[in-house]
Amino acid sequence: MKKISLILSAVVMTAMMLSSCGGVASKEVTIGKQVWMTQNLNVDKFRNGDPIPEAKTDEEWSKAGENGEPAWCYYNNNPDNGDRYGKLYNWYAVNDPRGLAPEGWKIPSDEEWSRLADFLGGESVAGTKMKSTDFWADYGGKSGNGTNESGFSGLPGGYRNGFGSFDYFGEGGFWWSSTEDATNFAWYRYLYYNDGDVNRTNFNKKFGFSVRCLRD
């Protein structure tokens, strides 16, 4: 653990500006041999320039999921949430052949997410190092914030379920992987306010999660 901390302090925390992504300047950080964006994706066009449909109403969101079509939204359909937390995307946007990630980037696979957690000491401790130092809910008189010693800057942007309801804002951060698990499910990672884990599980592709990009 001491060795990992030394590596983190000496190497990982070096972040630099990168080219504009969706009109908003983003940052990147090197974690091990991976280079991650330090902000959630906030684009409304695919890499080829085609627009990604915005689904505001519950009906629009549910219909997109039922039809296996890409969609995005802001949490609670509030554009003010976009600057800090980015957009929420269903997995059909993540997997669209037109490319959700900007040029030079990709959506991390399940294995690439695991590599990140392993470098940070394993799933049971990596979450604390990935969570931002602010914006997480308190629990039992304790702060739910992390140390962010990885530089990942994970935020509790919540999610939107398949029927269109929003939940867990301030309590959980949820990020898609590019890896399908079954016909209707795909793998994702989440951080939660009341523990230090980075959790791996699968969920329905209709859900709206955040997206974090990895250098291609």
Image: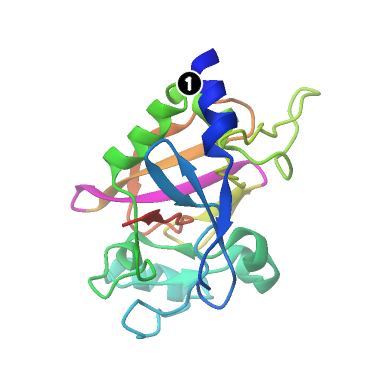
When the figure is inspected, residue 45 is found, relative to residue 161, above or below; the finding is below
User: Which one is nearer the viewer's eye here, 21 or 186?
Assistant: 21
Q: Residue furthest bottom?
A: 50
Q: Secondary structure at mark 1?
A: helix
Residue 192 percent coordinates (x, y)? 57, 35
Q: Residue furthest left?
A: 183
- Residue drawn at x 50%, y 21% is 4
When the figure is inspected, residue 5 is found, relative to residue 38, above or below; the finding is above
Count every numbered label the image shows and give the total: 1
Q: Which residue is mark 1?
A: 124
189 with respect to 129 (left or right):
left
Q: Residue furthest front?
A: 10
Q: Amino acid at mark 1?
A: Ser
The answer to which quarter of the image holds residue 16 is bottom right
- Residue drawn at x 57%, y 31% is 10
> What kind of secondary structure does the magenta stretch mostly adopt?
strand
Instruction: Report the span colored magenta.
Output: 170-183
